Image (spheres, grey):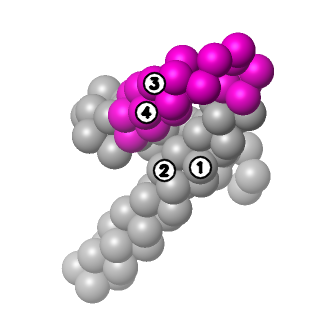
Amino acid sequence: MQEKLALTVIRGAESWQFFAFVFAAVLVLAFGLIEELPSKASRLVARVVSFLLVGYFTLISAWGRNLLVALLDAFKTEAH
């Protein structure tokens, strides 16, 4: 029982680390693309919207989290 609990805790930590990595990578990409927008106001609005959307799909949305965990499982399966 303890071993299953330890594996669950490790898997949960790996998932959150993966979410943080995806969140940061997507935001860096989005913010890089946003810098190409012509006006300062549109860049600000685009930054806020992209941050909220990426945050929602990686941290709040169950569908987005399940998709990322499935992706993490695929990476872990291919690595072993």
- Depth check, mark 1 against mark 2: the one in front is 1
Q: Tell me if mark 4 has few (under 14), some (14-19) or many (20+) residues whose alpha carbon lies within 10 angstroms of its own.
A: few
| Disc 3: CA contacts within 10 A as few (<14), some (14-19) or many (>=20) | few
Residue 33, placed above or below residue 76: above
Q: Which residue is drawn at 51% across and 62% down?
A: 17
Task: Name the residue beneath numbered marker 3.
Answer: 45
Give the prevailing secondary structure in the magenta stretch.
helix
Q: Callout 3, which amino acid?
A: Val
Mark identifier at residue 24: 1
Q: Give the extent of the magenta segment.
A: 33-55
Can the viewer see residue 74 in this picture? no
Q: Marks 1 and 2, how far apart in space?
A: 8 Å
42 vs 52, nearest the viewer: 42
Frontmost of labels 2 and 3 is 3
Question: Which SS class for mark 3?
Answer: helix
**Residue at 34% from the left image edge and 45% from the top image edge:** 59
Q: Quadrant of the N terminus?
A: bottom left
Cα–Cα span, label 4 and label 2: 19 Å
Q: Which amino acid, by three-letter code, is at mark 4?
A: Val
- The residue at the point 70 percent across, 14 percent down is 38
Q: Which mark is residue 48?
A: 4
Pointer 1 and pointer 2: residues touching (CB < 8 Å)?
no
Say if mark 2 contacts mark 3, CB within 8 Å.
no
Q: Can residue 40 be found in the magenta stretch? A: yes
Determine whether 39 is above or below 27 in the image: above
Which of disc 2 and disc 1 is earlier in sequence?
2
Q: Which of marks 4 and 2 is nearer the N terminus?
A: 2
Q: Which mark's residue is nearer the viewer, 1 or 4?
A: 4
Q: Is mark 2 on a helix, strand or loop?
A: helix
